[in-house]
Amino acid sequence: MVWSAECRRTLRSGRVLALLALYSLFSLLVLLVVGGITRALREQLDMQIAQAGADASAASQVTEEFRKGFLGFLVGGDQAVMEALAHVPLVVVVVFKATLFFLPLYVAIMGFDQVSGEVGPRSIRYLTVRARRLSLLLGRFLSQATVLLGLVLIIDAGIFVYAWLTTPEFTLGSFAFNLLKFWLAAVVFSLSYLALTTLCSSLFRAPALSLIVNIFVLFGFWLVNLIGGFAAKDSPVAYVRYLSPSHYANGLLHPGLAEFAVSGMAYVVFTLLFLGGAIVILRERDL
Amino acid sequence: MSERAIEIVEVTRRFGPKVAVDGVSMTVNRGEVYGLIGPNGAGKTTTFSMMCGYLRPSSGTLRVMGVDPRVDGSLKGKIGVLPQDAILPGGWKVGPLLTYWGRLGGVANPEQEARTCLERVGLIEAWDVETHALSHGMAKRTALAQALMGSPPLVLLDEPTAGLDPRIANQVRQVIRELKDQHTTVVVSSHNLQELEQLCDAAAILDRGKLAQAGTMTELTGQSAEFRVQVARGTVIIPELEALPGVTSARMEGETLLHVRFDGQAHQPEEVISRVVGHLLQTGVLILGVSRGRRLEERVLQLT
Ligand SMILES: Nc1ncnc2c1ncn2[C@@H]1O[C@H](COP(=O)(O)OP(=O)(O)OP(=O)(O)O)[C@@H](O)[C@H]1O
Ligand SMILES: [Mg+2]
């Protein structure tokens, strides 16, 4: 009940539209930049190849090598992931990675005041005598999640349509399959960040504060993942990256079911952890 | 079902070093209209907030309609609340908002109920108004309508008439009387003590977090028996008045107001008043009126 009412209200408010616009604008930008860069690089490569007087097969090999190298950089050099992504246009992967990177921020901006925006002006006082705090929180979370799913679907579909139009070898079957896969990955990924946003939102009375803390935590997670990644393989510091949700992002596109499941589970665990924390905090706190 | 609608035992609430409510105990019986009185910062709103489960007491126990208000969802359908400083959520129109709240609270026919309650507070024309476009008084009445939805057996009203114009304030008092007729328990706070004296069966007087006195209205006002006489013309002879049976003190407040205290235990007020007025008329004093009101106010001013 909270869910449907909140969904309607969220959709009615301008913020979703603004975010959609921002999100698509950003994706478009990345798309253009990446498209431009790849085209320029390819031209340059072609020129080099032509100067070297090599034949066409060598040329395509070089392009393929370049593509592989770039992809490897993006997904962290996992061979299986690279193979699985071989059929997906490079632009899609790049844009997807870029949007994934910024998705937590969008989520934060969308949902930072879902609880604190009601606790601050105390309008939540009208609600807690009517419904359980638990259902209020879950309703909020679910409505935001619904909106988010739609938002991500629209953007992902947009990227894929672009890729489909520009890449002739991209078939409809692989289009649909990959779209579903990327969308699922983005959804699992963003739900955990939405839960984090819910947690930050329940912690503070001032919405601005919860937004700032939320963003701090996001940077914290990236930092932890980076530190863990740079640390020597056997040092204990390397293990801290398992504490950060960002560490599991690549596994979401992994073709192996096990890897996907592990990463997916990791995100589910993070989601439950954050959401559970939010519930406990909202239950115990003064309103 | 116990006879008590609200039972508060030794409740204390601190905000950091500040003790907002300090060891307060009181009971509200079912069907009673109960007043919560005290100067600004006395702890009335904090007490209300603990009754509604918004705040957890630092120590002590509360039972509201037989349940612990801090248990999540335990008060659903049992109380209606007009919180003092809660802002109506934005992005809603009044009617749909109340309908939504009614549905949340499990009211059978929420839209119908929302209309009825808005009508009771005289605000049905605001059905299609956005909440942020309401004036202070309209917002307050919307919040009051919200508290009435679903006819809960207990209604808590934190300063329902503050900031309302006299006519609307009167309408709100009428709503409270109707609630009383329906045997709804009402707890109401106000700085308008005359209003509380009219409405309430019992009251608690809070001062700086402590309970100064609690009891029925007669208990609260009985001890201070006094009245005032508005004098138009003539000379009041104070010593003669003070010699009348029952009168304990008489003095002039300004040029025209005579203030008389009497022994309310041993004498009926009507006897003492008639005697004093009779004496005044005999000595050639012309009077404009006699007032007995503001007894509660006297008591509160004494205590706080
Ligand atoms: N959230 C809070 N944090 C800190 N102090 C608080 C808080 N809420 C209330 N207080 C303090 O507790 C005391 C009681 O406040 P409360 O709001 O209960 O008074 P009140 O009787 O309702 O006053 P008023 O007539 O002005 O509404 C005040 O001194 C106030 O400063
Ligand atoms: Mg108050």
Image (cartoon, rainbow, N blue to C red):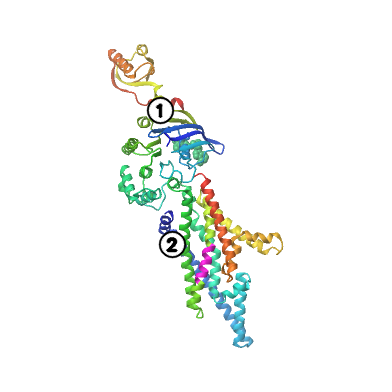
Q: How many numbered marks, from 0 up? A: 2
Q: Which residues are magenta?
A: A179-189
Q: Is residue A24 above or below residue A142?
A: below
Q: Position of residue A167 (x, y in %)?
A: 51, 78
Q: Residue at x 35, y 39 (%)?
A: B164
Taking the image as four quarters, which one is ligand 2 found in? top left
Q: Which chain hosts label 1?
A: B
Q: Which residue is mark 1?
A: B216
Q: Position of residue B149 (x, y in %)?
A: 36, 45
Q: Position of residue A182 (x, y in %)?
A: 52, 69
Local crowd size for mark 1, using a 10 Å CA cut-off: few (<14), some (14–19), many (≥20): some
Q: Is mark 2 within 8 Å of ligand 1?
A: no
Label 2: which secondary element: helix
Q: Is residue A204 visible?
A: no
Q: Is residue A217 above or below residue B299?
A: below
What number is the disc on residue A17? 2
Amino acid type of the residue tagged 2 in the rendering: Leu
Distance from the alpha carbon under mark 2 to that under mark 1: 58 Å
Q: Are marks 2 and 1 on the same chain?
A: no
Amino acid type of the residue tagged 1 in the rendering: Thr
Left or right of B301 in this view: B121: left
Q: What quarter of the picture does the N terminus of chain B occupy?
A: top left
